[in-house]
Image (tube, rainbow, N blue to C red):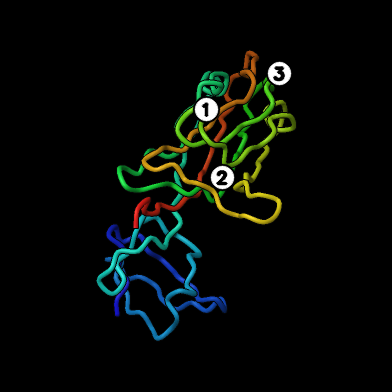
Amino acid sequence: MRLESPDGKLVQLKDGNERVVLVSDAAGAVALPATTVASLSVTAGMSAATAVLGGATVAIVTRSADVAFNPTQIKALNAPATLVASPGTGLALVFEGAVLFYDYGATAFTIGTASGLAVRYTDGSGLQVGQSLVAGLLDQTADKFRWIKPWTPASGDSSVVPVAASPLVLQMLTADVTGSVTGTVLRVRTYYRVVPAVL
């Protein structure tokens, strides 16, 4: 049995016991040792949306997308900006988390009534899947970073309803931050999966 990545960027998979069970060659194709495929999890370097396993296409990898916002763009985030483009018809994005890195330049932002940075589906009225406070981040005079984990209910039902063919966007909640800021960059790395919306 072989596991192939269409873009050759498949690097390493581990099984449930943290044993490396396969590593790709330059073409992204590898031999799969005898192991339980269902127990495999992605650990590093994965970027392909799907892989081919025994002739069937399966979504098993976590992907990432990087976006950088300059001061002008940061001050306009009350109008949502795209983090991950729509995966297309019949597919949905599953948000798995995001790293925010505030690369300080000169002068901090004034927070005002801005209350947070939200990751949503589609647009400013879409389902929120994660959020970070902006106080303690954008008003700082040194580099900072945050991890936004995906929202899940406190107990009971742990499901979310992904929005098919929808992008993931970043929005400043309530109002935009302000300030005469130069040189600062907000870098966002979004981790996600692409899954079928219909089986």
Relative image position of residue 31 (x, y in whole percent)? 32, 79
Residue placed furthest toward the bottom: 34
Q: Residue at x 63, y 13 (%)?
A: 180
The image quadrant that residue 173 belongs to is top right
Image quarter of the C terminus: bottom left
Q: Residue at x 48, y 49 (%)?
A: 94
Q: Which residue is mark 3?
A: 113
Q: Which residue is mark 1?
A: 125
User: Where 9 sits versus 149, above or below?
Assistant: below
Q: CA distance from mark 3 to mark 2?
A: 23 Å
Q: Which mark is residue 98?
A: 2
Dot 3 and dot 2 residues touching (CB under 8 Å)? no
The image quadrant that residue 122 belongs to is top left
**SS at mark 2?**
strand
Dot 1 and dot 3 residues touching (CB under 8 Å)? no
Residue placed furthest toward the top: 180
State which mark lies toward you, 1 or 2: 1
